[in-house]
Image: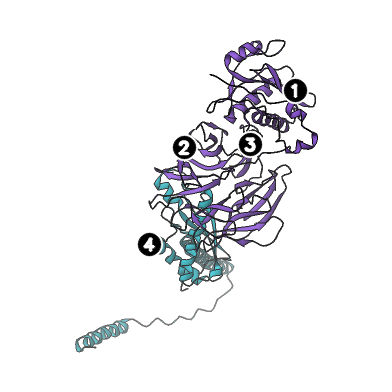
Chain colours: A cyan, B purple
């Protein structure tokens, strides 16, 4: 620490101390006057006010819990979305493009934080080519995704591959934009058993 | 048109001793002869009897679809006045033969007339179920047509055959003339049916769950032969009918395997090293298999021995970005392999000659895929979108004539049956 910064620190400390000294001590509680006589109306008022306070407290707690639940659900949905996010391929290829790697990298912390989770990877193709070769190509795409995740430390047995070939296009058209939407791998989770745990939580 | 007719029939065949009959080819060869490159003219005469008109229509169409005879239209009494065929008129038209099919109580009665000799060349009776059994009755008429075509030309027809194909998540079946289309399977995920050599069963795969299934065509009974994780696709029967070859893979490419129909474990045939190897088709002698492989980076057709050895690239390797050759089917005479190839952004059908590797493009109209040979080795069924929707078509590879078989919802992956017996 240089001399100049130590002076500065000292100055801040002194100001803080002064500020603390300015605060007045809290007033001592005034003892309650002994009840002169039983007043049913006053008792009712007191009971009502206690009930109102309790109701208010309950409602605050409830809204707090529902906010927490909503937050948890939102976080879980975010994680599910992350896990479900598709990766896309080039025509007749199973190699992972940079965009596909980025999508897969984002899934890895979630998979690590939820070791009970199994990921079903389904390969799809566009409609060009033969139905049979496309089923094989879809399988090869799913396998390529699996290989990448395994290389990043996800256990082999947590990743199941399958292919639907060209049977379930995501986009119905017969143009390059639709074809690109259809050359994909999709992800489905099994065995989450409740909320997904956030990475690092 | 000059037609030299030679009638070697009849008496000679009938005079053969009974013991020698086993060696006579099925059906009776009439021995019409006609100039090479021409097709004999045939008139199908009207006949009396209930249902005879539809019989006549079916036989005329069968002969027409066979592409080996020239079916001549001749209506009513002028062709066949009371008292027999109108010989002078038939001769003037240049008809080589006239044909008459009459319904009988138990079946069908066929008469073939040799126009040049003005004689009855052939009389034959065929059993047939009642016309109320539409499928069986039509099959009997088609059988008669095939016999007739063999008598007239020396080559048996393929009218009595059926085609299975995939439509709307089911396997369907249709007669070779486009009639009697109906689903064979429940809704599911079946794909790529293939016929057993005896025509009694089909094999196909489903992808949910992934497995290979064998189904009897008539009874509909189904059994799963093999299945599990990954993909199971494109089964075919070995030519002796004892086993299947199919493609299977999980995480390390897709390879060809074989499994016996009576159990046993699967044996791997191809060594694709992570590539896709699918759609096998046997040479008729069962010694070689042609298949689609992506081992060179894109799909090409390869051949190998039935045990997986001696792999050879069949189609000339094309290094173009868009090269894509797939879906091979070996012709029944063993000479050609038909396949589909990417041509100018679409797919077209080609054949490659096994002897000299000569290529021949068969189609150019629309997108054409999934060829499957008829048992005559001359006609191909395939999928084309030339009518706007993917439908089954049949192509005569000799004349280039094409006809549409199916209508309605789109179809794919047809397989033409062998010649079929009675159901």
Image position, residue B21 (x, y; %): 76, 36
Task: Name the element at disc 2.
Answer: loop
Task: Name the element at disc 3.
Answer: strand
Disc 2 with disc 3 on a shared chain: yes
Image position, residue B46 (x, y; %): 67, 17
Q: Residues within 10 Å of mark 1 (few under 14, many from 20)?
A: many
Instruction: Note whether residue A42 is visible.
Output: no
Image position, residue B145 (x, y; %): 67, 29
Residue at image point 39% right, 60% down: A97
Q: Which mark is residue B103?
A: 1
Q: CA distance from mark 1 to mark 3?
A: 24 Å
Task: Name the element at disc 4.
Answer: helix
Q: Please give the residue where the numbered disc 3 appears in the rendered image.
A: B174
Residue at image point 26% right, 83% down: A12
Classify A44 as above or below B299.
Answer: below
State how many labels appear. 4
**Which quadrant is home to the C terminus of chain B?**
top right
Classify B218 as above or below A16.
Answer: above
**Of the residues tagged 4 and 3, which is closer to the observer?**
3
Depth check, front residue: A102 or B381: B381
Q: Which mark is residue B363?
A: 2
Instruction: Verify CB contact (< 8 Å) between mark 4 and mark 2.
Output: no
Q: CA distance from mark 2 to mark 3?
A: 23 Å
Disc 1 with disc 3 on a shared chain: yes
Depth check, front residue: B344 or B183: B344
Q: Which mark is residue A98?
A: 4
């Amino acid at each position: 620490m240089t001399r100049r910064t130590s002076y500065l620190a000292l100055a801040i400390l002194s100001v803080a101390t002064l500020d603390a000294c300015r605060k007045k001590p809290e007033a001592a509680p005034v003892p309650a006057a002994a009840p002169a006589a039983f007043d049913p109306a006053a008792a009712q008022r007191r009971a009502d006010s206690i009930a109102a306070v309790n109701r208010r407290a309950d409602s605050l707690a409830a809204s707090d819990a529902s906010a927490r639940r909503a937050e948890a659900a939102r976080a879980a949905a975010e994680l599910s979305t992350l896990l479900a996010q598709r990766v896309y391929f080039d025509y007749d290829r199973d190699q992972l493009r940079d965009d596909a790697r980025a999508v897969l990298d984002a899934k890895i912390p979630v998979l690590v934080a939820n070791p009970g989770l199994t990921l079903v990877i389904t390969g799809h193709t566009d409609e060009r080519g033969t139905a049979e070769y496309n089923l094989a190509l879809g399988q090869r795409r799913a396998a390529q995704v699996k290989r990448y995740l395994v290389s990043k430390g996800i256990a082999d047995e947590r990743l199941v591959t399958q292919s639907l070939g060209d049977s379930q296009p995501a986009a119905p058209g017969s143009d390059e934009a639709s074809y690109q939407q259809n050359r994909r791998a999709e992800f489905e989770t099994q065995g989450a058993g409740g909320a997904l745990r956030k990475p690092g939580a | 048109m000059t037609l030299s007719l030679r009638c070697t029939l009849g008496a000679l065949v009938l005079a053969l001793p009974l013991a020698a009959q086993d060696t006579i080819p099925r059906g009776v060869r009439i021995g019409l002869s006609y100039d090479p490159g021409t097709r004999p003219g045939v008139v199908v005469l009207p006949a009396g009897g209930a249902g005879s008109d539809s019989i006549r229509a079916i036989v005329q169409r069968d002969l027409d679809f066979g592409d080996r005879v020239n079916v001549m239209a001749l209506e009513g009494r002028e062709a066949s006045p009371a008292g027999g065929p109108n010989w002078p008129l038939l001769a003037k038209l240049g008809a080589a033969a006239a044909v008459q099919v009459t319904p009988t109580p138990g079946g069908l009665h066929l008469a073939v007339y040799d126009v040049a000799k003005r004689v009855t060349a052939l009389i034959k009776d065929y059993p047939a179920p009642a016309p109320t059994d539409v499928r069986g009755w039509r099959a009997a008429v088609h059988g008669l047509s095939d016999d007739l075509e063999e008598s007239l030309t020396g080559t048996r027809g393929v009218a009595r055959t059926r085609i299975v194909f995939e439509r709307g998540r089911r396997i369907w079946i249709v007669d070779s003339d486009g009639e009697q289309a109906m689903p064979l399977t429940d809704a599911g995920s079946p794909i790529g049916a293939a016929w057993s050599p005896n025509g009694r069963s089909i094999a196909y795969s489903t992808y949910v769950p992934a497995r290979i299934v064998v189904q009897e065509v008539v009874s509909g009974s189904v059994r799963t032969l093999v299945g599990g994780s990954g993909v199971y696709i494109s089964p075919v029967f070995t030519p002796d009918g004892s086993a299947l070859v199919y493609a299977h893979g999980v995480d390390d490419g897709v390879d060809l395997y074989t499994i016996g129909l009576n159990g046993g474990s699967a044996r791997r045939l191809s060594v694709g090293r992570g590539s896709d190897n699918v759609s096998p088709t046997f040479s008729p002698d069962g010694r070689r298999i042609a298949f689609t492989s992506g081992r060179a980076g894109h799909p090409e057709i390869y051949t190998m021995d039935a045990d997986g050895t001696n792999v050879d690239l069949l189609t000339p390797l094309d290094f173009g970005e868009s090269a894509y050759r797939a879906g091979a089917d070996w012709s029944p005479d063993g000479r050609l392999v038909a396949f589909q190839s990417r041509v100018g952004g679409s797919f077209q059908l080609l054949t490659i000659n096994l002897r000299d590797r000569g290529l021949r493009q068969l189609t150019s109209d629309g997108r054409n895929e999934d060829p499957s040979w008829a048992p005559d080795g001359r006609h191909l069924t395939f999928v084309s979108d030339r009518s706007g929707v993917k439908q089954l078509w049949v192509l005569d590879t000799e004349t280039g004539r094409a006809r549409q078989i199916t209508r309605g919802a789109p179809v794919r992956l047809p397989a033409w049956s062998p010649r079929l017996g009675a159901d």
